[in-house]
Amino acid sequence: MRVALFVTCVNDALYPATGVATVRILERLGVEVDFPAGQTCCGQPQFNTGYRQDAEPLARRLADAFRGYEHVVTPSGSCAAMVRGHYAGFGAQAAALAPRVHELTEFLVDVLGVTDVGAYFPHTVTYHPSCHGLRLLGLGDRPRRLLEAVEGLVLRELPGAEECCGFGGTFAVKNPDVSAAMGRDKIDHAVSTGAEVLCGADNSCLMHLGGVLRREDAPLRALHLAEILASTETEPLEWTESPR
Amino acid sequence: MSGTFLGMPAFPVAAKAAVGDATLRANLRHATHTIRDKRAAAVAELEDWDRLREAGKQIKDHTLRHLDRYLLKLEEAVTAAGGTVHWAADADEANRIVTALVRATGETEVVKVKSMATQEIGLNEALEAVGIAAYETDLAELIVQLGHDRPSHILVPAIHRNRGEIRDIFRAEMGEWGRPAPDGLTDTPADLAQAARLHLREKFLRAKVAVSGANFMVAETGTLVVLESEGNGRMCLTLPETLISVVGIEKTVPTWRDLEVFLQTLPRSSTAERMNPYTTMWTGTTDGDGPRDFHLVLLDNGRTDTLADEVGRQALRCIRCSACLNVCPVYERAGGHAYGSVYPGPIGAILSPQLRGTESEIDASLPFASSLCGACYEVCPVAIDIPEVLVHLRERIADQGGHRLERAAMKAAGAVLGSPRALAAAERLAASTRRLHPKRLPGASAWTDSRELPEVPAESFRAWWKRNRT
Ligand code: SF4
């Protein structure tokens, strides 16, 4: 099977390791991965801030970049939700892209039908289900099932898991005090689990949470789910990679 | 809307103070988490919740689509039952009507059933201005009134107060308004309730005029419905001689049968009860029973304008259950006062800017008072897609000119993101200068005051791909 990777602008510029990890997982499972270089951003920041007109050309460009691919995979629940939820209003080609975009865990579980991706990660992990993945995409227990199948991984329950972390795109800068208060509570909950890793499937939320936990010197690190799933006994995750 | 809340600072400024108030945050956190867990359990008991939710949505949408027709039907039914209907286009007109009606009775005090509509129009203040005292009889409203405070929650207006604060307010203020608090009043719930009961009883027995709102108005019969937990409302609705109800036009439902849906969804969503302890219904006047004179003031105050907006009109489906407030992480930290309106929380963030317009600073900031997490939409018993309306209102504000810097930033981002080559070049530049990036950027203090910035990687994904896969 051949799929296109929609890496998202945040991952491309700030978290390339997540993109690389996604490629590794997919290739390990026998999927051929393309990276159409014409892609940039799905337009979510513009759309959600009220600049629909600025989002539209980006949506059209993205749809154009993925023309001809039956499956487009992205390691971002929130960008997948943007395409699936709002592209119908941006012309026929954009509308046609919507059902072909899969968030990574959806693709693994629903399309490939696997939960054990052959990963090895001997650490304690707690999982934060980002709002867009949880409520807009309805990822359900897919991420959990994937994590539970990882060898060596101990999953700890995150108290108040379904509460928003406070990122919310431009919300994080428009209402910084509320946003940071929400982030600190999330970090406190994560710390209370005693886990070494706070895992999520959306790097924008993790950028906010990672920023809070580094400022607070919290004893755990934020990590994208894909990077955990990519880790194997022979090629373990390199902990030296840039923190969130 | 009344001047009560105007002149409020924009949401982020008001919220900042609330976030720093440890007592307030603890009060709110405790109260909202308790009720949110109970609500979830009460809703889970009903197997057909999703269908009830859909039915409620459909009934409201249908009614709103034909509101003109149902309002005329309602007027006809109320009049036939012996009531009098008044139409009020805005707050001032509604206040003038009510003031004149009270004056005509010769009375100088009224008892009040908890009502959002009368708060929205600032009725208490308008009555006070002409020498009429309005006494709130709902326990939480009483606390707010005695504390010279403002409500901060739809259902529990004094949610921001704890028991110790309430005892202090009762001790200091009850005597000014009527029967003083009993000596040695403690902060146990039973003691506080008893103090309120004694204080209020005196008012119920004396009052000749009552002012209420209504949760529903049934067009076919002209029946008004109030749901409440304490029984104070029932006292006000039956004891006085004159009853004046001020109700937003969107509270109409076509038939008696439609109540079947809302009498299930409202209590479970709001107080997590299977049924409301008191459901009072009244139709016009009846000889020898209840008020002899009944007036219904139908309030527009921005509602027909809201109705004209195809996306925003869904806010008028709201049945004021307050479930969205109780699950909202932003409300939990910012508190109700930060929203600068009698309608706080997620519903306030979409309703107030529609009813009042988006010109004032506070109203222009409300659509941004959300992280769009979607928890409000998930719990709403009439399925109002609050995030959708928030984004829609953000567009309206951007179209008004938006915030200058933001507009510039969006344009700049568009220039880079509009071309993969420009994006790659920007990424290369950022990577090659990464050692020079300051830890705290002057322009990004909103971020760096409380969070670290991410470090720019040595190589973008795009560059990695080029090196490794092509
Ligand atoms: S918007 Fe929905 S959840 Fe919020 S108060 Fe209204 S009916 Fe209840």
Image (cartoon, rainbow, N blue to C red):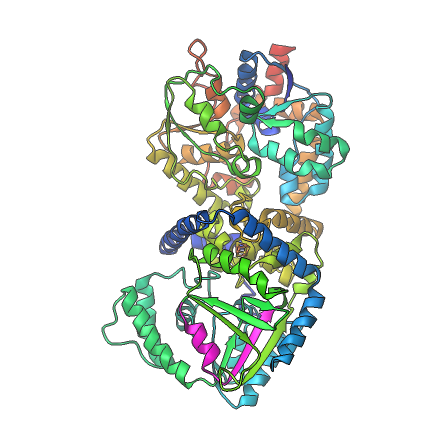
Q: Residue furthest top?
A: A234
Query: Which image quarter has ligand 1?
Result: bottom right
x and y percentages locating residue B446 in the rendered image: 52, 43
Please state the horizontal and vertical placement of residue B423, each as a whole percent of the image: 67, 26
Residue range (magenta): B230-248
Q: Quadrant of the N terminus of chain A?
A: top right
Q: Is residue B353 visible?
A: yes
Up the image or down, B189 lies above or below B417; here it is: below
**Which is more toward the observer, A24 or A218?**
A24
- Place residue A138 in its image quadrant: top right
Name which residue lies at 34% across and 66% down.
B166
Question: Farthest residue in the left direction?
Answer: B184
| In the image, residue A178 above or below residue A97 | below
Residue B431 relative to residue B168: left or right: right
Closer-to-camera residue (A117/B423): A117
Left or right: B391 in relation to A229: right
* Residue B368 belongs to magenta span: no
Residue positioned 68% across, 25% down in the render: A39
Q: Is residue B246 left or right of residue B267?
A: right
Q: Is residue B237 magenta?
A: yes
Q: Position of residue B382 (x, y in %)?
A: 57, 53
Identify which residue, B41 or A144, lies in the foreground. B41
Q: Residue at x 38, y 21 (%)?
A: A153
**Camera-nearest residue between B378 and B449:** B378
The image shows residue B71, relative to residue A77, as above or below, that is below
